[in-house]
Amino acid sequence: MGNVEIKHPLPPFTLETALEKVQKAEDAWNTQDYVTVSKAYTIDTEWRNRNVFLNGREEVQAFLKNKWEVELDYKLKKELWAYKDNRIAVRFEYEYRNKAGQWFRAYGNENWEFNENGLMQKRYASINDLQIEEQDRRL
């Protein structure tokens, strides 16, 4: 049993544990540590991120590594939208700049599904980017 991965809090979620799960996800993503972030997902996790479909933790790691190499000064804020049983929906926004120095704010929604050990087995994200000026940053 020592090999079983567990990521608290576990489903079924309450308001308190859903809020905790969302905050832990926000905190982890803001580290931009793609290996640590990927450990919140099952080995065989399924993702849709915009128009990219990923399968498995290794693909997630490669995706996140690339993401944070091009999305510089990344800062994310997540907000709980809804929860039930082993599912959570969030809205989020994040800001970043590209290598040319142009700032963006991305808005989106995510639907999450967790296994019994609290690892995310499905993540479906719809995201839109808005070009902004540096002085218009909020995060």
Image: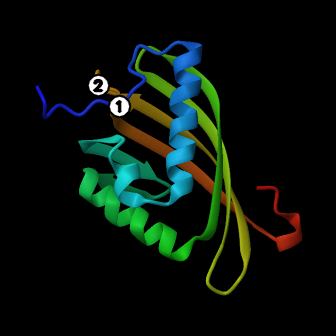
In this orientation, which residue lies closer to the viewer: 4 or 22?
4
* Image side of residue 114 versus residue 90, left or right: left
* Image side of residue 75 versus residue 37, left or right: right
Q: Residue furthest right?
A: 135
Residue drawn at x 29%, y 43% is 45
* Image side of residue 64 versus residue 129, left or right: left
Q: Position of residue 104 (x, y in %)?
A: 71, 67
Residue drawn at x 63%, y 78% is 98
Name the secondary structure under disc 1.
loop
Query: Disc 1 marks which residue?
Result: 7
- The colour scheme applied to this rendered structure is rainbow
Query: Disc 2 marks which residue?
Result: 117
Residue 132 is tagged as: none
In the picture shown, does residue 90 fall above or below 27?
above
The residue type indicated by label 2 comes to Asn
The image quadrant of residue 72 is: bottom right
In the picture shown, does residue 25 fall above or below 11?
below
Q: Are marks 2 and 1 in contact (CB under 8 Å)?
A: yes
Task: Give the number of callouts.
Answer: 2
The residue type indicated by label 1 comes to Lys
Residue drawn at x 46%, y 58% is 51
Q: Which residue lies furthest to the bottom in this view?
A: 100
Residue 85 visible? The answer is yes
Q: Where is residue 53 in the image (x, y as percent from the top left)?
A: 36, 55
Dividing the image into 4 quarters, which one contains the N terminus?
A: top left
Q: Where is residue 6 in the image (x, y as percent from the top left)?
A: 28, 30
Dividing the image into 4 quarters, which one contains the C terminus?
A: bottom right
CA gap, disc 2 and disc 1? 6 Å
